[in-house]
Amino acid sequence: MNSAGLTNDQSEALVNFQAITECWDNSMAMQIMRKHNWDVTAASNEFFAFFSAEAQMQDRINYDQPAPRQEPPMQNQNQNQAPQVAPQNESYWSIRSWLT
């Protein structure tokens, strides 16, 4: 037994579980491992199933919320000033071309 009161097999199972799941919280990892009688496969499956379901729920929450509206950036322009109109291309046919 080591200082945490685990046998060598339990310590190895805990290290393997943490390596697979990247769950570095020792108390959480040990709790899940004890729940599954130190079966790394069963504990890993529960860990991933829980966090996968949580991620899906968070995605659903984020999806249901409307995206924040983004306003186009304001240019340095007086709001009372009329918008600038681009000059017309004279190569296109227009009524003005008939009159001249």
Image (cartoon, rainbow, N blue to C red):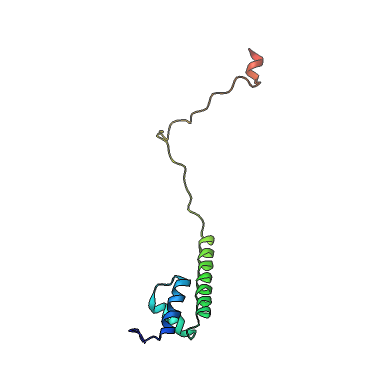
| Up/down of 70 relative to 30, above or below | above
Which quadrant of the view contains residue 60? bottom right
Identified at 35% across, 84% down, the residue is 2
Please give the name of the residue rendered at 43% of the width and 76% of the height, measured from the top-left corner: 15
Quarter of the image where the C terminus is located: top right
Q: How many marks?
A: 0
Tell me residue 55's x, y (percent).
Answer: 51, 67
Q: Residue at x 38, y 77 (%)?
A: 26
- Tell me which corner region of the image, top left, top right, bottom left or bottom right, holds residue 8: bottom left
Judge by depth and name the residue closer to the eye, 9 or 97. 9
Residue 66 placement, left or right of 14: right
Which residue sits furthest top? 100
Instruction: Determine whether, in the image, residue 77 is placed left or right of residue 43.
Output: left
Q: Residue furthest left?
A: 3
Q: Residue at x 53, y 76 (%)?
A: 45
Q: Position of residue 83 (x, y in %)?
A: 48, 31
Q: Is residue 95 above or below residue 50?
A: above
Say above or below: 26 vs 100.
below
Which residue of the protein is positioned furthest toward the front in this rendering? Answer: 8
Camera-nearest residue between 25 and 100: 25
Residue 23 horizontal/vertical position (percent) = 43, 72
Name the spot of residue 40 as percent of width and height, x first: 50, 79
Give the quarter of the figure containing the N terminus. Answer: bottom left
Which residue occupies the foreground of this view, 32 or 53?
32
Task: Work out whether residue 72 or residue 98 is closer to the camera in this orientation and state it.
Answer: 72
User: Left or right: 26 with respect to 91?
Assistant: left
